[in-house]
Image: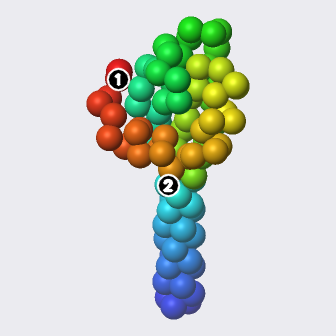
Amino acid sequence: MRHLKLIVCSLLVTGFVALHAAENKNAVKPYPLKTCVVSGEKLDAMGSPYVFNHKGQEIKLCCKGCLKAFNKEPEKYLKKLATAPQGK
């Protein structure tokens, strides 16, 4: 009986840790800028920004029209995000 309790507790802890790890894996890094990473325009310059996730990074563009340029060279824009000062 004692071994059964130990096994059940171990399984519960393992399940909790696995679930928590999966939640963190799906976490998306927030977009750090107030401007479009493609055009440099304010995010609300053309109405509501176009928002999507790309490889775990939230991306906000001033309009859906900038999506084509982003998709053409996503690594270029992700690099801009990584080196950009926060909140600009």
Amino acid at dot 1: Gly
Above-or-below relation of 23 to 63: below
Q: Which mark is residue 87?
A: 1
Above-or-below relation of 84 to 71: above
Give the residue at x 54% y 68%: 18
x, y percent for residue 24: 49, 54
Give the crowd class for mark 2: few <14, some 14-19, many >=20 residues within 10 Å. few
The reply, left or right, for residue 6 in relation to residue 61 is: left
Quadrant, the N terminus: bottom right
Amino acid at dot 2: Asn
Q: Tell me the distance, in whole angstroms, between the alpha carbons under discs 1 and 2.
A: 24 Å
Give the residue at x 51% y 91%: 3
Quadrant, the C terminus: top left
x, y percent for residue 58: 54, 38
Q: Secondary structure at mark 1?
A: loop
x, y percent for residue 66: 64, 28
Give the crowd class for mark 1: few <14, some 14-19, many >=20 residues within 10 Å. few
Where does label 2 land, which residue?
Answer: 24
Q: Which mark is residue 58?
A: none
Give the residue at x 56% y 8%: 45
Give the residue at x 70% y 25%: 64
Residue at the outermost left position? 85
Residue 27, visible in the rendered structure:
no
Closer mark to the observer between disc 1 and disc 2: 1
Residue 41, visible in the rendered structure:
yes
Q: Nearer the viewer, residue 38 or 62?
A: 38
